[in-house]
Amino acid sequence: MANFSDIRREMIDCQIRTADVTNYSILKAMSNVAREKFVPKNLQSVAYSETNLNVGLGRYLLEPRIFAKMLELLNVTARDLVLDVAPGYGYSSAVLAGMAEAVVAVENKYFAEESQNILIKEAIDNAVVYEGVLTAGLGQEESVDAIIIQGGIEEFPSELEKQVKIGGRVIAIFIDGVRGACWKGLRTETGIDWNFGFNALVPVLEDFTKKKEFIF
């Protein structure tokens, strides 16, 4: 039987630290969450793989290195309320819960139920997952300090933009064909100012694909 504690430690040392992520709060949060508990049983043996793991129904558990670098850009504080979009079975929400004051997540009906059950089993009481439309978020303007999206997007919806407080942050991986990059957005009075973070290629979430325009 696999010793997941050792595998988790190896992930930190060989995937996260080697990507120059040395922030203590990130390393601690990722060390404290049993990644294998947030995937189906048949995928537990590959939960720590250096890949974006397909967990089914259009959701992926992002590669540890990529997720850690996203957290580094997000710069979570203990006072933050973070909106986690498309967390699948809830791993990202669990890690964020170890860094932020509270985490709210948005998922479809299936994943909202599954991830909330896992969070309860893991005794994580400052994260909650709501059923909803991913691109609509919580539907409350200027309600969160930060937003992070667990998958690629082709465009960032205005509905989510409005939900970040002025001065708040957004982390998203924009995909353009075979190219991808993680960008950090800063909410201002006039919108979001985007700055390049690092190159990253992850699968695109269907809800965040550009609408095709038909020319007649």
Image: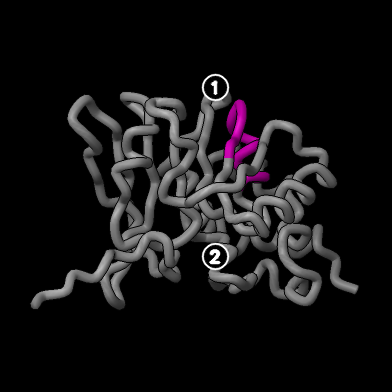
Task: From the viewer's side, name the closer residue of 100 and 161.
Answer: 161
> Is residue 102 one of those drawn in magenta?
yes
**Relative side of 198 to 71, left or right:** left
Residue tagged by mark 2?
A: 63
Q: Which residue is mark 1?
A: 79
| Colour style of the rendered protein structure | one colour
Up/down of 89 relative to 184, above or below: below
Q: Amino acid at mark 2?
A: Glu
Q: Quadrant of residue 48?
A: bottom right
Q: Residue at x 46, y 61 (%)?
A: 151
Name the disc covering residue 103, or none: none
Is residue 152 among the parts visible in the rendering?
Answer: yes
> Which range of residues does the magenta coloring cover?
93-104
Q: Is residue 80 left or right of residue 99?
A: left
Q: Amino acid at mark 1?
A: Arg
Check if residue 115 falls in the magenta segment: no
State the SS at label 1. Answer: loop
Earlier residue among tags 2 and 1: 2
Which residue extends farthest left? 216
